Amino acid sequence: MLRRRRRASPEVPTASMPDIAFLLIIFFLVTTTLYMDKGLGLVLPRVGQTKVVPRKNICNVWVNAAGEVAVEGEIVPLGELREEVARRLKENPKLIVSLKVDELAKYKVFVDVLDELKLAGATRISIASPEVEGGP
Amino acid sequence: MALERRSKVEVRIPTASMADIAFLLLIFFMVSTTFVRYRGLPVELPEAEKIQRIETRRNLVYIWITKDGKICVNDMLADLNSLEDMMSRRMRENPRTIVSLRADEEVPYGKVSEVLQVLRRAEALRVNFATRKERR
């Protein structure tokens, strides 16, 4: 009788294991932010690395302070910009889109236009810098 | 007597695998967790459709531009002059740096353009215009 009572069970007590695990889960749930960095990528040209491009390979896109968009001098609604640029790209796959945005235009318009250009399949996009500014 | 005892059903929920489930969830959250590194400034990002994810957070530098023109680099307030120093130092340390530009959608484009020019001078050429996914 005495012998039996003295025998300790050689088990590790795992009863509280789920409690520990759930505590940690709650910690990670609270601190987690499933947060992704995403956006429109663009590679800027180096300073002084300006190239002369034949005029026929350039498509100028202007945005004025009021947020109106013009392609080669003609005002195009934002909704039709994609088709217009895609059509021009089809005619000339080497086309470089030069985006010239007014200083007072909102950044939102710039992003919208850049998005439309990318959706149209334009890969060669140039953002005109103030030092080489030349309006229409 | 013996028959009666055998038919008694044990009324316990099996909790032996609870710990396994908990640890599985724990591992999922540990793997998918990314901690927010910088608080930044409050900005309302513009929306876009054709967005890319930036895979590596290691090479990222965040630049915030708020509505009232405040610039903040990785939680440090900056102006256009200090931005160039900061960025060129950063580019020397890690030439593969990508800039995530988190500008408010109401910012005039002129301000963004100035920052882009500074980035060009600092040789930080890979820029990503941070946007939200467009909801339709």
Image (cartoon, coloured by chain):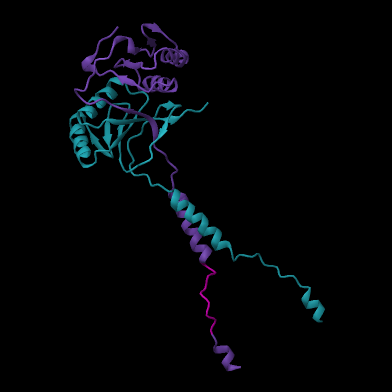
Chain colours: A purple, B cyan
Q: Left or right: A99 with respect to A14?
A: left
Q: Which residue shows up at 40% across the image and 7% down it? A: A75
Task: Using the image as rendered, state which of residue B26 and residue A61 is in the foreground.
Answer: A61
Q: Which residue is drawn at 26% across and 25% down?
A: A45
**Residue located 25% across and 27% down the image:** B115
- Magenta range is A8-16
Q: Is residue B41 visible?
A: yes
Left or right: residue A57 versus residue A10 is left
Q: Where is residue B67 in the image (x, y as percent from the top left)?
A: 33, 26
Q: Quadrant of residue A85?
A: top left
Question: Can you tell which quarter of the image residue A53 is in?
Answer: top left
Of all residues, the one furthest to the bottom in this rendering is A2
Q: Is residue A56 above or below residue B84?
A: above
Q: Can residue A58 be seen in this view?
A: no
Magenta span: predominant SS is loop
Q: Is residue A135 magenta?
A: no
Q: Quadrant of the N terminus of chain A?
A: bottom right
Left or right: residue B64 versus residue B25 is: left
Nearer-the-camera pick, B23 or B125? B125
User: x, y (%) of residue B69?
Assistant: 28, 27
